[in-house]
Image (cartoon, coloured by chain):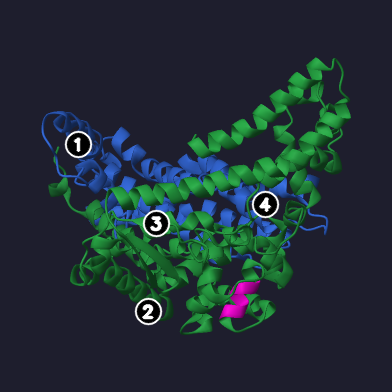
Amino acid sequence: MSRRRARAACGLSCLLATLGGAGHAVAQIDESALLEELERLSPVYDEAVRRADVADSLETLEEYSALTFEVDTTAVGPFFLITRGDQTNDLVPTARAAWAIYDAYLDDRPTALDGIHLWLQVADRRARRVPLAADGGTNLRSLHSQRERVRRFAEQLGRQLGEALPAEHQRLMGILRLHGARDERLSFVYRELVVSNDRVAGSCFEGDLDDCRRGLGLQDEATWWESWYGPERLRLRIQPRVTATLRGAGERAETASACWEAESADACLAFASTWMEAESYPPFSFGARESFVEYALRSGGEGTYQDLMAVEAGTAIERLAEAAGTSVDELTAGWRDEVLANRPDVMEGTARTRWATLSWVLVLLAFSMRSTRWRLG
Amino acid sequence: MFRQILYTQWKSAKIGLGILAVAGFGLPLMAIQDLTQPVYISTQGEVTADVIFSSWQLWLPFFPALAGLAGVGLALNAWNWDHKTGHIYSLSLPVTRWEYALLKAAAGALLLMIPVGMLAIGSFTAVAALELPNGLHAYPAQFIGRFLLASLLVYMFWFALASSTMKTVGIILGVFLTLTIGGQITWDILDNFITLPGGADPADWFFARMVEWPGPFNVLFGNWMLIDV
């Protein structure tokens, strides 16, 4: 704990100690009055801690720069880089080149988006507190020739910048990590929509765009898990978690028993509501979610990614739609159409397997018809 | 002569063929039987796609196993009496060895159509019994075709082995086992003493050549789904 934070913490604890001591001294003090006083002081304490945090971070930066090198601040694409002064000349061209490469990939080669998700994480303009150093010295030439180095650079940059991402951006985190050809990925999503056991997957496949958004986890809803799974599915997911101990005692014993014994979906939901939010994930896979963002960026055309960075208000899907220059419904429908157009060829390779097998059958038949010279015994 | 050879094989294999036929008809139906239970029916009164899909996947390994069993059984049955009687009967026939082997192979292949046919009836019945949700499709023809080819391949593999002497069979199976099990053990032992090149395990390589296209057993490892997207 820093000196400032220690002082802030001490400020409240010392005050409490004083109040407690005073209470002792006057023998009796109204408990509710004490709680009120604590309540009144709480924001003061929070503010003190916040200021201590800010001071700590500034102090770290000051110490960092004062003890080692000067600090430079430069804008690159959507980022603000704070770099060591002696490395600015190397790092800024590196960062600009990295940004130019990824920006071009976004428009022309969506399959090469590996690593970009970290750039999405760093989209927030408040993220400026970045001591950047480790990958310094990379020159433009090697950057172009070593894509892997660019990726590592982007990852490091993103990791350091990404902490300040506001909550509504969190749903975009990690979405863009694409592998394989686009049609293969979309075929995988197609299969997922058809055979997933989540209710919303089937109805998205049938054409319910709201459920597509629910499945992608891009629809803001307080109790989203209720809309993701039907009551029976919810019960089947929750019931195995109801242990004998939970049924026997505790605050949730009644709902636990009703869930376990009566197989009541409502009771199971009541039992699980405390942890469902923390432990449930969107029904659609990572691949489905990334295909959606990829579609949004691609359909918007050149500059969509910068536009996305510029949009500051709205939910994740609203921001994507605005950046893509379309409505949420049109964006969702377009993505769904693209998925449905990529129905996997489940019998792919069957014909060549058939011919290969028939050839082997003939070879084996020829062996079996050979004269006794083939026999070794 | 073909009729006599066919009759001889039928006579000795009819009980086994009966069992295979029942299995062929019943397996597709058993794979979908659980789907009639209420727990799998959605509130709209339909069996959902994921349940159909996962239920079939549970039963899926039985189909190549049945194809293999049918092939091995009929191949060994075809040469059983010849080995027992020291090939006296075949030597007494006015045909060459290749003609005799061809007739025998054809008779066995024809008998193989009994379990294949029953599987076809079972598959079409299973597909007809299910109302497939939107997005799922039935592939009975491809499924039956794969079963036919797989059983035919296993049949011919064992037919070729059984047509030779025990010594030949021993040599062929010995080489097969040496390359797979022996190769793996040798490789593991050597790996403790010297640095071996990664990804060059001979047993893995041999297995891959056998099961990946255009290897002989590729048909046993492909898509055996009767119902798919």
* Distance from the alpha carbon under mark 2 to that under mark 3: 44 Å
- Could you tell me the amino acid type at mark 3? Val
Report the side of A12 relative to B194 (left or right): right
- Could you tell me the amino acid type at mark 2? Ala
Which residue is disc 4 drawn over?
A: B51
For the image, the number of numbered tags is: 4
- Dot in front, 1 or 2: 2
Part of the protein shown in magenta: A318-323
Q: How far across and how far down the image is residue A116, in percent?
A: 42, 65
Do marks 4 and 2 share a chain?
A: no
Q: How far across and how far down the image is residue A190, in percent?
A: 57, 67
- Label ID, residue B183: 1
* Distance from the alpha carbon under mark 1 to that under mark 2: 50 Å
- Could you tell me the amino acid type at mark 1? Gly
- Dot in front, 1 or 3: 1
- The chain holding disc 2 is A
Mark 3 vs 4: CB contact within 8 A: no
**Chain A appears what colour?**
green
Mark 1 vs 3: CB contact within 8 A: no
- Label ID, residue B219: 3
- Could you tell me the amino acid type at mark 4? Val
* Distance from the alpha carbon under mark 3 to that under mark 4: 26 Å
Residue at 75% across, 46% down: A234
Mark toward the start of the polypeptide (1 vs 4): 4
- Neighbourhood count class around disc 4 (C-alpha, 10 Å): few under 14, some 14–19, many 20 upward: some
Which residue is disc 2 drawn over?
A: A104
Res B107 seen here: no
Dot 2: element:
helix
- The chain holding disc 4 is B
